[in-house]
């Protein structure tokens, strides 16, 4: 056993060993020297003034006991998640003396700070919590802090001097909670204390930084959320901090509540709707027992009742946390009138916004456009808007869902809802008009893609305002849905436009896009009917760009119908029209479409010549989706011509420019699978086919019918030619290939690529050459019945290394037991010995 003592000078905890000996009085030589100097000074005072020498004291340590302040409140419920944040705080507080936790109201700043302070308390002689939420102004800040620390005034010392005297040079941690409404006086006090108390460290929580020299700002983010593809996988859902917090708090309200495959997706969606905001998740979970998860989710869908649902917090907690509306209202009251105006007007920008959007929507009513940017910065500093991650320009921001719901309430109450919606509608329409000149607008990237949620919300609520703009924006929203492979949503919007009189003003644009959507839905008859309608409308309108777009759409319908010659005819006519318009990129894009149709019709040679003409332009100047499509077409043409190395290089080039998690990356992966199949590498072909099929199921996307048939035929041939073990190994290996790992394997650049060419006597379909020489030795000894320690002794390895080799063998061969491995080796060895 050991017993605890403290340094007589600074109060640091000391450990006295049980073996005996003279106990330590000081934690370091520095404290020992300072104590000596104080005793010497006291003796000198005694000699000059007379009287008895003072009794030995340890003033700072005594002060520690007297100024312990408010003890940290005990945690009455469990602390969930935030392990990475706690680790980061520990590292930061070792290198800074002022660490400020910022974040939106209800994000969990105070709870995180308290949890961190509890874990760090043993490293400080004193740890004090000062709660500032009840303090109305900064006039009595110093006295309130002193009172919280249990320090009274002394003759000749008041205010800051009292605090400095009490803290002295002791190692202390001061936790100032909820500083945002007293930011300036807190900043002045902090600077003074840190300047005069050399071993003091301060941990502050605030919705905005204190902005003083030496401050380190730690932004507390929302709790982690489950991935979109988690589905009803309970294990995957519970990895998210927000879900675990919901379940934990719900179980307190309704004992026996647990996550399962039925309620798991509902709980995950609740957490997503609440953006992982800690207080919001806890308040929603508090309704379990009264409401089912489905009812809670329905309440969150209703914006009018959302904040009412997120109410009823702890009676004993801070009043600002009694509900989400109260928490946000606390922040809102601290804004000046201009900040409040911009804050509420941003509520109509549902899906986030950049500075240009904010200027267009929020300016007016006394706020100049040039003033909007600094006001955005102020709102971001106060954690009422958050910056979206990423370095892409322009920088985008958003309001968290519950904060936006509060802002919308304030917007309605101010009477500004209709004019703000009108401003947003005008801004969106101006964005749409910028891209009006595109010949193939359905397939061109648009700035409106980033505004999809706002594009869906504003026209729906701006009824009775500028009907022509509303119709145009409905078409643009359908285009966004089509480009993101959401044909059902696009089709529903287009069906309405086809019936509306306002839709006729757009000529054949609506019918052309509807034809593409029908082709995407594999409905060839409807696609062809709509394509015919689009061409007829555009021929009557005599607008060359519109006619070219309609011909291209009808060609897509012919391809969907399997009528490749008709598609080629339409695309040749389309190319003639586009050539007259003089846009090199549009000419190249139409040429690429014609090459793809020729490939389906059996005209590989002409298709190759066309791609040689258009690929340089698209590769160098077109946006990456068009460049990726052109490279894929060129690769497919070279594959059909039997030029496998060239095809592989082109498909690999697509993978270098397409995002690994998107459906665009699946086409080149499938192309490389076809190259592998044509090269005789059936196991690689099957593995890529299986991995791509799994990814397509996750993304709910399908390739065009001719391409899909080629992939299915290659996979079927590989299954037929491969031995059972190799076939099973390919399927098992495919399950591990997702995202970047799939791309790395397809490019032969990652650890997933285990190809090791062996002797020429072994065929490409034989899986044994995929094992390393050492792995084959291990397999051979397993087949002889040796144990891992025996194999290790025979080969001069450790038993752990042998086990690792066997794990790799199992993964490569798809075999689970030593018996299966032995049987596989015996069978393969006998097959290899056959002349």
Image (cartoon, rainbow, N blue to C red):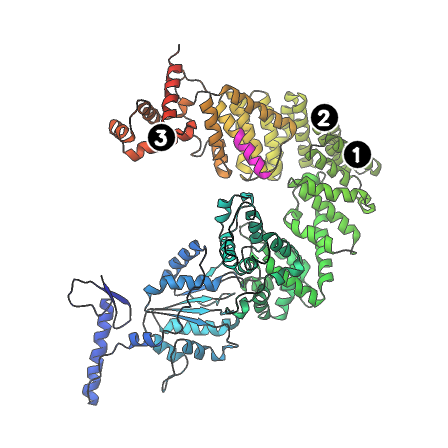
Write down the residue under mark 2: 568
Identified at 36% across, 23% down, the residue is 822
Question: Where does the image place residue 351, in percent across and percent down from the top left?
Answer: 63, 53
Question: Where does the image place residue 120, in percent across and percent down from the top left?
Answer: 36, 62
Q: Is residue 54 left or right of residue 824?
A: left
Write down the residue under mark 3: 806
Vertical arrangement, residue 187 with respect to residue 356, above or below: below
Local secondary structure at mark 3: helix
Q: Is residue 641 magenta?
A: no
Local secondary structure at mark 1: helix
Q: Earlier in the sequence, mark 2 or mark 1?
A: 1
Q: CA distance from mark 3 to mark 1?
A: 64 Å
Decide whether the magenta segment is chiefly helix, strand or loop: helix
Q: Which mark is residue 767?
A: none
Vertical arrangement, residue 184 with respect to residue 522, above or below: below
Q: Which residues are magenta?
A: 689-699
Question: Where does the image place residue 575, in percent across and percent down from the top left?
Answer: 72, 30
Q: Residue furthest left?
A: 21
Q: Is residue 488 left or right of residue 34?
A: right
| Quadrant of residue 581 within the rendered picture | top right
Q: CA distance from mark 2 to mark 1?
A: 16 Å
| Quadrant of residue 331 within the rendered picture | bottom right
Identified at 66% across, 64% down, the residue is 409
Q: Which mark is residue 535?
A: 1
Q: Nearer the viewer, mark 2 or mark 3?
A: 3
Local secondary structure at mark 2: helix
Q: Are marks 2 and 1 in contact (CB under 8 Å)?
A: no
Front in this rendered view, residue 720 or 85: 720
Q: Is residue 168 left or right of residue 332?
A: left
């Amino acid at each position: 056993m050991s017993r605890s003592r403290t340094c007589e000078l600074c109060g640091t905890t000391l450990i006295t060993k049980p073996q005996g000996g003279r106990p330590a009085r000081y934690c370091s030589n520095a404290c020992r020297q300072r104590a000596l100097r104080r005793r010497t000074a006291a003796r000198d005072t005694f000699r000059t003034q007379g009287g008895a020498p003072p009794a030995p004291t340890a003033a700072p340590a005594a002060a520690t006991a007297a100024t312990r302040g408010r003890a940290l409140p005990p945690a009455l419920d469990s602390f969930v998640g935030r392990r990475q944040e706690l680790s980061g705080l520990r590292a930061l507080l070792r290198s800074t003396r002022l660490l400020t936790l910022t974040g939106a109201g209800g994000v969990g700043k105070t709870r995180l700070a308290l949890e961190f302070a509890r874990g760090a308390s043993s490293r400080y002689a004193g740890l004090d919590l000062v709660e500032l939420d009840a303090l109305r102004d900064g006039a009595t800040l110093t006295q309130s802090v002193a009172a919280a620390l249990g320090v009274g005034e002394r003759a000749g010392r008041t205010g800051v001097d009292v605090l400095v005297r009490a803290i002295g040079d002791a190692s202390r941690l001061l936790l100032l909670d909820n500083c945002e409404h007293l930011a300036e006086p807190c900043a002045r006090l902090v600077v003074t204390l840190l300047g005069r108390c050399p071993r003091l460290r301060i941990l502050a929580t605030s919705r905005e930084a204190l902005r003083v020299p030496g401050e380190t700002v730690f932004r507390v983010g929302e709790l982690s959320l489950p991935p979109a593809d988690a589905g009803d996988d309970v294990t995957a859902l519970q990895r998210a901090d927000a879900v675990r917090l919901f379940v934990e708090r719900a179980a307190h309200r309704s004992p026996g509540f647990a996550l399962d495959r039925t309620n798991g997706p509902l709980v995950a969606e609740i957490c997503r709707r609440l953006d992982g905001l800690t207080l919001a998740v806890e308040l929603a979970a508090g309704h379990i027992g009264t409401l089912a998860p489905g009812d809670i989710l329905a309440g969150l869908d209703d914006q009018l009742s959302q904040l009412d649902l997120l109410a009823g917090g702890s009676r004993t907690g801070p009043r600002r946390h009694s509900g989400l509306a109260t928490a946000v209202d606390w922040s809102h009251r601290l804004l000046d009138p201009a900040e409040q105006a911009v804050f509420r007007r941003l509520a109509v920008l549902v899906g986030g916004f950049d500075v240009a959007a904010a200027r267009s929507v929020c300016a007016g009513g006394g706020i100049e456009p040039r003033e909007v940017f600094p006001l955005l910065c102020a709102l971001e500093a106060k954690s009422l808007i958050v910056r979206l991650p990423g370095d892409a320009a322009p920088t985008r921001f958003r309001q968290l869902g519950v904060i936006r719901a509060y802002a919308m309430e304030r917007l309605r109450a101010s009477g500004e809802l209709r004019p703000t919606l009108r401003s947003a509608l005008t801004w969106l329409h101006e964005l749409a008009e910028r891209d009006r000149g595109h010949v193939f607008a359905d397939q061109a990237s648009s700035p409106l893609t980033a505004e999809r949620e706002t594009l869906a919300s504003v026209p729906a609520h701006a009824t009775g305002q500028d009907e022509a703009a509303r119709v145009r924006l409905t078409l643009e929203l359908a285009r966004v849905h089509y480009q993101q492979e959401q044909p059902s949503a696009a089709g529903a919007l287009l069906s309405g436009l086809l019936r509306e009189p306002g839709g006729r003003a757009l000529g054949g644009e609506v019918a052309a896009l509807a034809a593409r959507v029908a082709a995407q839905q594999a409905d060839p008859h409807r696609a062809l009917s709509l394509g015919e309608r689009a061409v007829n409308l555009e021929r009557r309108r005599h607008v060359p760009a519109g006619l070219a777009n309609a011909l291209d759409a009808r060609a897509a319908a012919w391809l969907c119908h399997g009528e490749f010659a008709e598609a080629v005819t339409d695309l040749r006519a389309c190319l003639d029209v586009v050539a007259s318009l003089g846009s090199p990129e549009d000419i190249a894009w139409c040429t690429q479409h014609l090459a793809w149709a020729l490939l389906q019709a059996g005209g590989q040679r002409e298709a190759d010549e066309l791609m040689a003409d258009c690929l340089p332009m698209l590769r160098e100047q077109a946006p990456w989706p068009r460049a990726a499509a052109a490279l894929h077409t060129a690769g497919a043409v070279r594959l059909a011509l039997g030029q496998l190395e060239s095809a592989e290089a082109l498909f690999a080039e697509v993978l270098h420019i397409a995002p690994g998690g998107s459906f665009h990356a699946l086409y080149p992966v499938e192309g490389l699978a076809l190259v592998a199949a044509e090269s005789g590498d059936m196991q690689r072909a099957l593995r890529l086919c299986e991995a791509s099929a799994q990814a397509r199921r996750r993304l709910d996307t399908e390739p065009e019918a001719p391409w899909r048939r080629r992939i299915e035929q290659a996979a079927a041939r590989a299954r037929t030619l491969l031995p059972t073990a190799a076939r099973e190994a390919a399927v098992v290996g495919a399950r591990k290939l997702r995202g970047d790992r799939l791309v790395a394997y397809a490019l032969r650049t990652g650890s997933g690529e285990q190809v090791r060419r062996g002797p020429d006597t072994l065929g490409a379909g034989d899986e044994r050459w995929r094992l390393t020489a050492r792995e084959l030795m291990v397999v051979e000894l397993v087949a002889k019945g040796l144990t891992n320690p025996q194999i290790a002794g025979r080969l001069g390895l450790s038993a752990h290394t042998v086990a690792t080799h066997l794990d790799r063998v199992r993964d490569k061969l798809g075999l689970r037991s030593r018996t299966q491995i032995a049987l596989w080796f015996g069978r393969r060895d006998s097959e290899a010995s056959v002349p």
